[in-house]
Amino acid sequence: MIRVAVFGAAGRMGATLCTAIAEADDLDLVAAVDPAAAGRMIGDVVGIAGTSIVGPAALVEVVADAQGVEASGAQVAVDFTVAGSARENLAWCAENGVHAVCGTTGLTIDDRAELQRLFGDSTSPNCVLAANFSIGAVLMMRCAELCAPYLDGVEIIELHHDRKRDAPSGTSLETARRIEAARAEHATVGVLAADPTEQVTLEGTRGGVLEGGVRVHSVRLPGLVAHQEVIFGSLGETLTIRHDSFDRASFMPGVLLATRRVGDTPGLTIGLERLLGL
Ligand code: NAD
């Protein structure tokens, strides 16, 4: 059994994850951290995700911060909080020899460098950081990367629920970076065409633009979960790659895979690709 702690246990992702861990035969939910539900039993908290925990895991008491995890003997901690909290929680994991799995988005390139410093040492615990744990989304990014050098232009539309705090999504940024890297690797591929827009009558309508020229547009609406379209355009044709997560359950197989494998995956691992053999 792998002993697992969850940071953000009372949140939408954390609560879904606590239920998934409780249902897994080889994982033991030993600690649940969330200041928003401190002092309550996790079994009473997870209802917000439309799931329920049965069995002994339901009796785990939610604690306010990482100090409460110390006594639990957790071997792996999974973080689904907000970027500011994730920075602190991950640093705590590194200092306390607990392997970390992080799905929290909004972390920057500088944060990654800091995580490399914290988890890159041969004596430190390991960390898996993924902007998207859905296997379908990982494949969507891989497909976008494969197509990138062969088509002239590309823009990304990411669509999320109306309570998402960061924009654009971590997945769209990761996809854009990988498209730019794939294009840069092919010597024959030119830079993306300049934006033809000469007059913007409504600020923001052309989206945000990354260094390499990929544009990202963010949509926030009730009813959505997590969705993304990568639209490539070329002479007389377009190619659209679309992925939809309709339920937070879609992230669980990937999170559980990372939770099981992080202990024997040295250093900092970005994305699920390596664990999936992609
Ligand atoms: P949420 O707002 O429902 O939950 C976040 C929870 O974290 C809250 O309950 C909050 O009280 C708690 N929290 C804040 N600070 C904390 C701390 N220091 N310690 C412990 N708990 C703390 O958000 P959500 O929808 O569950 O999303 C959480 C994060 O996961 C976001 O960054 C989101 O973008 C990301 N996300 C990632 C994936 C992925 O596959 N990587 C998928 C979905 C969401």
Image: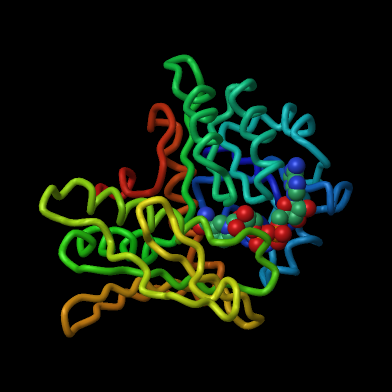
Describe the colour scheme in one phrase.
rainbow
Residue 210 location, quadrant: bottom left
Q: Is residue 96 left or right of residue 141?
A: right
Quarter, ligand 1? bottom right
Residue 218: where, in percent of width, then height?
54, 70
Residue at 55% across, 61% down: 168
Question: Where does the image place residue 198, in percent across and percent down from the top left?
Answer: 44, 75
Instruction: Using the image as rendered, state which of residue 149 and residue 26 is in the foreground.
Output: 149
Picture layout, residue 25 above or below residue 66:
below
When asked about the image quadrant of residue 12, the answer is bottom right
Q: Nearer the viewer, residue 246 or 77?
A: 246
Q: Position of residue 25 (x, y in %)?
A: 51, 51
In screen coordinates, is 133 left or right of 84? Answer: left
The residue closer to the viewer here, 7 or 82, is 82
Q: Residue at x 33, y 52 (%)?
A: 178
Q: Is residue 39 visible?
A: yes
For the point 56% across and 68% down, the residue is 248
Depth order, front residue of 150/80: 150
